[in-house]
Amino acid sequence: MLGLAARSVRQRPGRFLATLLSAFLGAAIIMTFNSMHDTAGARGVDKVSSESLTTAASVVGGYGTLLVFFAIASTLTVNVRQRTEEINLLRTTGATPAQIKRMVVGESVAVALVGALLAIGPAVLGGHILLDVFKDSGQVADSVSYSFGPIALMSGVAVTFLAAAGAAFLAVRRATKAAAGVRQRTSRTRQFASWAAVVVGALAVCSTFAMKPTDAALMAAPAYGAIMLSVGFALVSTRLLRTVLGRVEPLLAALTGVSGYLTVRNMRRRAAELSGVLMPLILFTGMATATLYMQAIENDAIKASGLTKSIDDKNLETLNLTVVGVIVVFACIMLINSLYAATAYRVREFGQQRLAGATPAQVLGTVAVEGVVLTVTGVFFGTLSALAGILPFTVVRTDGLLPEQGLGIWIAVVAIAAAATLVTSLATARRGVRVPAVEAVALAA
């Protein structure tokens, strides 16, 4: 089966382009920041510079590892869904589930390793740029020289390899095991994990009130709480979507008529697939909004006090902005992949709608309504998670209830989320409706 996997990659390289891109970007980011460990451990590096570099590498490396796994997992889920017919054919010709798993995992690992090797050059360049940023902000001494060593290289290759192998195994396992009992246990596991994340997030947020405004770790507790609440909502995104659809059905029916009614019915039927879109939306909105607002509040508080930023303050600001950048990249990758999977498989459905009398514009209008519902739902629960962290931090740090920064940051975050959702879904649907209706209906579902 491993030989079959290698031939599959050679014959159809376009299928694995999204996996290659996810692995490439993930390995590049991980190696870029973990090269700071190599730089910090070099001879002649002073203690302050070493601490700044090590902190950046540890924090962003941890977030990056988690996000790399989710990005590759979403990409491979798309890949496996597109190959349902192929997997069924292999099963009918005598292949066992274990053999199919070895084939898919072998393909994924091969592509991921190629992506990791291609990322070495950009990671070295990115490491040089990152070190210059630390030097310009005064966090690292000018005498520190850049070093790309075994920590960066091995971490990038190892994390990419493990993420690809683990994500591919889970994706193909879901595809080959469709027993109702298994799905029920999986649902219960996700629900338990969701409640656990919500409880941990709530405890972290509440612990903010036990801190002093000048505590160095004041931002850590509410930020971590907001992240965990976002994760908790994301894990039960299917249930959240069905709940929202039940509430907005009368409104959509009143605004758009029969098409709105049909849109809600269709989204309810496909809620499990569409939940893959809500997960990155909730995570991106919650984590980006909470981190950016807290950092803005902290900057204004320091400026109002008349003090200058310390090295620790600059480290924290750099880390927060970098983490948000990493989240933006991978959340957009997850969102685009999930939307592509959810829309590309509907070519046959679009053809049936057109044969029944719907125009291409009406089909695209339905997809646009779905995109708006998904965006509003994801932004709503992501914003709730962010507010749970922002409000306690504002109360303790400034003695106010609401941040004075206004809605500008939130609007920017929402604009990015909405653009990624609507542009991807409409572009994919537009390509689908270009297929002649009779030909589209003849395609395998």
Image: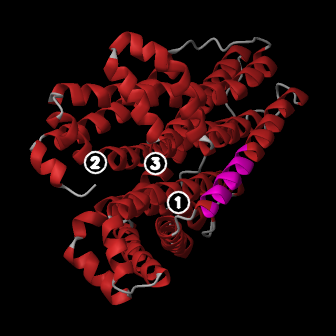
Circle 2 is placed at which residue position?
344
- Verify CB contact (< 8 Å) between mark 2 and mark 1: no
Q: Nearer the viewer, residue 274 or 385?
A: 274
Residue 306 in the image: x percent, y percent?
71, 17
Q: What residue type is labelled 1?
A: Phe
What residue range appears in magenta? 181-194
Q: In this view, does 236 lie above or below 292?
A: below
Residue displayed at 32% across by 47% down: 340
User: Which one is earlier in the sequence, the residue at label 1 or at label 3?
Assistant: 1
Q: In which quarter of the image is the C terminus?
A: bottom left
Q: Does the magenta stretch include residue 195?
A: no
Which class describes the residues within 10 Å of circle 2: few (<14), some (14-19), or many (20+)?
Answer: some
Q: Nearer the viewer, residue 28 or 37?
A: 28
Helix, strand or loop under label 3 = helix
Circle 1 is placed at which residue position?
69
User: Which one is earlier in the sequence, the residue at label 3 or at label 2?
Assistant: 3
Residue 330: image tag: 3
Main secondary-structure element of the magenta-colored stretch: helix
Q: Nearer the viewer, residue 426 or 301?
A: 426
Tell me the CA gap for discs 2 and 1: 23 Å
Q: Does the magenta stretch include residue 193?
A: yes
User: Which one is earlier in the sequence, the residue at label 2 or at label 1?
Assistant: 1
Residue 137 image-quadrant placement: top right
Q: Which of 237 and 323 is in front in this view?
A: 237
